[in-house]
Image: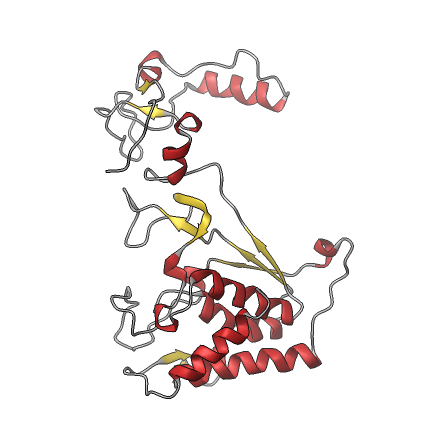
């Protein structure tokens, strides 16, 4: 979607006609001001100015990476979107979780990630490596927003990275971020996670045979516990671990020491059908 950034600009211009209901502060560094810690701004004008700045930099100082072996020249910024641009915008002493669709989020979003691209450009960054931005499970989630590695669907974006006030879908907002980065000549690398999934993973509904299934009565083991009657990583003796490491390092995966019988009986057959309740 090559015009996503223009759609974003148009929406911000529409919203700009009305005054934002809350005070909105940003880190002063986002405005290239190193003399203070934060600055109050009009959020609509702030984001529009940042996009304008990106277009200007694209015309005058666009980064040029070689097509061949560009990774050898990559200066990478590892970005966890939800965290990288999280900020106490209303200055109440904490980063709040959004509860309505008429405010900007205080947790990190693609829109705010666009806003810091000029600063990253100034730092010499030419590659953005995004930690997982896909949808996160809610069953058994960690904290208020869950772990980005507890993937509910690897083919859908995390709605918490959008700004609902824009009334633009998450795909458009993500595309706008990628488009803005490309305007500056930056590469965008996205980390996809297929090895781990949330308890309420969509893939478990479609392909239960891809998962291990544990008996419902089995409880999770507490961190640091050695209770083999509860589920957790299999427990091996020091000698077994040494043998496993030696065989794996040698490329020998035949007859590796097996987990204990107590561990193996925790698992059950793959269900014929899985339903979300």
Residue 28 visible from this viewpoint: no
On the rendered image, what quadrant is the N terminus found in? bottom right
- Image coords of residue 68 (percent x, y): 78, 54
- Examine the rendered structure and indicate whether residue 190 appears above or below residue 258: below
- Examine the rendered structure and indicate whether residue 211 appears above or below residue 36: above
Q: Residue at x 42, y 68 (%)?
A: 168
Q: How many marks?
A: 0
Q: Residue at x 54, y 78 (%)?
A: 51
Seen from the viewer's position, the closer of residues 238 and 16 is 16
Q: How is the image coloured?
A: secondary structure
Quarter of the rendering containing residue 234: top left
- Examine the rendered structure and indicate whether residue 53 appears above or below residue 116: below
- Examine the rendered structure and indicate whether residue 65 appears above or below residue 104: above
Seen from the viewer's position, the closer of residues 47 and 240 is 47
Could you tell whether 62 is left or right of 177 in the image?
right
Q: Residue at x 28, y 42 (%)?
A: 139
Could you tell whether 191 is left or right of 134 in the image?
right
Could you tell whether 239 is left or right of 228 in the image?
right
On the rendered image, what quadrant is the C terminus found in? top left
- Image coords of residue 216 (percent x, y): 24, 25
- Image coords of residue 161 (percent x, y): 41, 61
- Image coords of residue 227 (percent x, y): 27, 24
Q: Residue at x 64, y 20 (%)?
A: 250
Residue 48 visible from this viewpoint: yes
């Amino acid at each position: 979607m090559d015009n996503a950034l223009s759609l974003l600009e148009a929406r911000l211009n529409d919203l700009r006609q009305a005054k934002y209901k809350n005070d909105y502060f940003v880190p002063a560094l986002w405005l290239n001001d190193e003399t203070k810690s934060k600055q109050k701004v009009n959020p609509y004008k702030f984001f529009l100015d940042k996009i304008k700045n990106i277009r200007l930099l694209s015309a005058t100082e666009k980064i040029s990476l070689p097509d061949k072996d560009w990774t050898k020249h990559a200066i990478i910024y590892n970005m966890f979107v939800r965290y990288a641009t999280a900020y106490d915008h209303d200055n109440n002493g904490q980063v709040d979780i959004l509860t309505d669709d008429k405010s900007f989020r205080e947790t990190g979003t693609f829109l705010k990630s666009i806003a810091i691209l000029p600063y990253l450009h100034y730092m010499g960054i030419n590659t953005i490596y995004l930690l997982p931005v896909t949808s996160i499970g809610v069953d058994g989630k960690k904290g208020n927003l869950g772990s980005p590695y507890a993937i509910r669907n690897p083919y859908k974006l995390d709605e918490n990275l959008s700004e609902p006030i824009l009334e633009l879908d998450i795909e458009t907002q993500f595309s706008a971020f990628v488009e803005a980065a490309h305007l500056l000549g930056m590469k965008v690398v996205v980390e996809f996670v297929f090895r781990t999934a949330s308890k309420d993973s969509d893939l478990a509904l479609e392909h239960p045979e891809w998962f291990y299934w544990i008996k419902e009565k089995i409880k999770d083991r507490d961190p640091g516990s050695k209770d083999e009657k509860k589920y957790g990583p299999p427990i091996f003796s020091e000698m077994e671990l040494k043998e496993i490491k030696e065989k794996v390092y040698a490329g020998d995966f035949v007859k590796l020491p097996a987990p204990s019988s107590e561990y193996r009986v925790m698992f059950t057959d793959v269900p014929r059908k899985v339903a979300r309740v």
